[in-house]
Image (cartoon, helix red, strand yellow):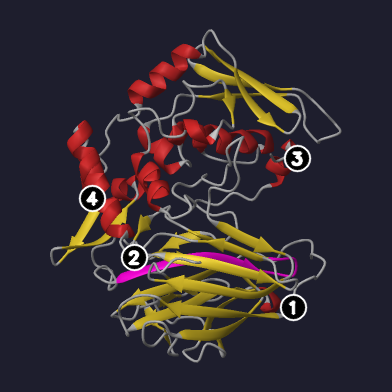
Amino acid sequence: MPSLRSLFNRVFKRGRRNQEQAPVPQSNQQGVATQQKPPVPIQEQVTTTASTLTVSFVNQTSSSTVYAYITGSAINNNYALVLLESDGQTLYYPTNASSIGSPLQENCAIPLGAPGKTVNCTIPHIAGGRVWFSVNSPITFLLNPGPNGPALVEPSVTNPSDKNINIQWDFCEFTFNSSQLYANISYVDFVCLPIGLQLTNTSGAVQRVKGMPSTGLISVCSQLQAQTASDGVQGWSNCVVNYKGSPLRALSPNQDLVMRPSDFNNYFKPYVSQVWSQYQSQTLNINASNVTIPGTVVEQELVFKVTANPKIGTNSSTEAFTSPTTADIFSCSTGPFATGSDATRNAIIPQLASAFNRTTLLKTNTIPSPLEGFYKNSITNHYARIVHGINVDGRGYAFPYDDVNPSDAGDQSGEVNDPNPASWVIYVGGGQVS
């Protein structure tokens, strides 16, 4: 369980905590997500990793037309936007774009070849990195002009005019810096292609995240539709995106709300009301190492009182939270869950937001809570429940604070990390990591 100090020092980014300095998401005039390069860190870390790392892609799909892309910010080149070219070795630093939506000037689609083939690439130290995959068609990346260089226009699953909207594409995330490789699979925004990870360090120790089987997307879509049939909430079925009669992807509720704001209207309201009622007479305890932060509902606010402790770097404070809406819970970033300059509040938010998504607050008054109690309420984040249930090892980011681990089990977010990485293998297609 992390110490309170470590919680205060975490860098929070929607759906990801693997970024050394997280890029700031932006939008172009058409609403397509872009990213600007991050600022240079104030303090440099002691170098333990090599300057480059071999990344191997294994095509476990049934298609011979599969592409990989590697994007991020080059740590040793002033955090400039960098992509790998199609040979998987040459670094491409785009010059500043002349206009919004400018094309890349190099071919950055790395062909993976026939099913079963392995392709090796070499990456430098990269922050805020993503490895993208597409099946049957390449991904179109664009560039927007920015004050500090070009911003990469990434594909969008909520912009109907996006050129990639009907393509099967997905990604995993990583940062490879002077102190470690950190990578994870992500379902925060949607489910599409199965991705698995295998990291081997210089001593031969192996870490694996197995991801979904080849039938994972079909299973997710089927269970979302079954959930609508069960509770009558149309939003679950609306998360299913079909193309030419077959499932293309399954959106998270947060992304569905981008397209259909009326979906899930007041869905969590009865549960939130029960929580507020229960903690008028009980105390909710957030535990961090040997520190307990107690909270109770006072005048319709959930109020936590933090005791000053110089040894762990906390000051005496009172943190009050208004009741969250359904959109607040799914996004983990709005209303009472919006982070700011208050480090104490920022430490409480992930614990509280994750407990609401997992709906454990009526079962126990302590968070984090045991894994066995996750998603047991009839009103819960069923998308997250379904995603975890279909992943072979139960791991994978299903909502923005899914890296808050249960009190009795390990990682839930589908991550691997090591200060001495020797090789990193990424499997696409659902053959699993054996």
How many marks overall?
A: 4
The residue to which callout 2 is attached is: 214
169 versus 84 height, above or below: above
* Mark 3 Cα shell of 10 Å, populated few (<14), some (14-19), many (≥20): some
Q: Residue furthest right?
A: 311
Q: Which residues are magenta?
A: 168-180
Asked whether disc 1 touches disc 2, contact meaning CB atoms under 8 Å apart, the reply is no
Marks 3/2: CA distance?
Answer: 41 Å
- In terms of secondary structure, where does tag 4 sit? helix
Amino acid under disc 1: Ala
Mark on residue 120?
A: none
- Horizontal and vertical percent position of residue 378: 33, 28
Residue at position x 44%, y 89% in the image: 105
Amino acid under disc 2: Ser
- In terms of secondary structure, where does tag 3 sit? helix
* Mark 1 Cα shell of 10 Å, populated few (<14), some (14-19), many (≥20): some
Question: Sequence-wise, which precedes: disc 4 or disc 3?
Answer: 3
Marks 4/3: CA distance?
Answer: 42 Å
Question: Sequence-wise, which precedes: disc 1 or disc 3?
Answer: 3
The residue to which callout 4 is attached is: 222
Asked whether disc 4 touches disc 3, contact meaning CB atoms under 8 Å apart, the reply is no
Question: Sequence-wise, which precedes: disc 4 or disc 2?
Answer: 2
The N terminus lies in which quarter of the figure? top right
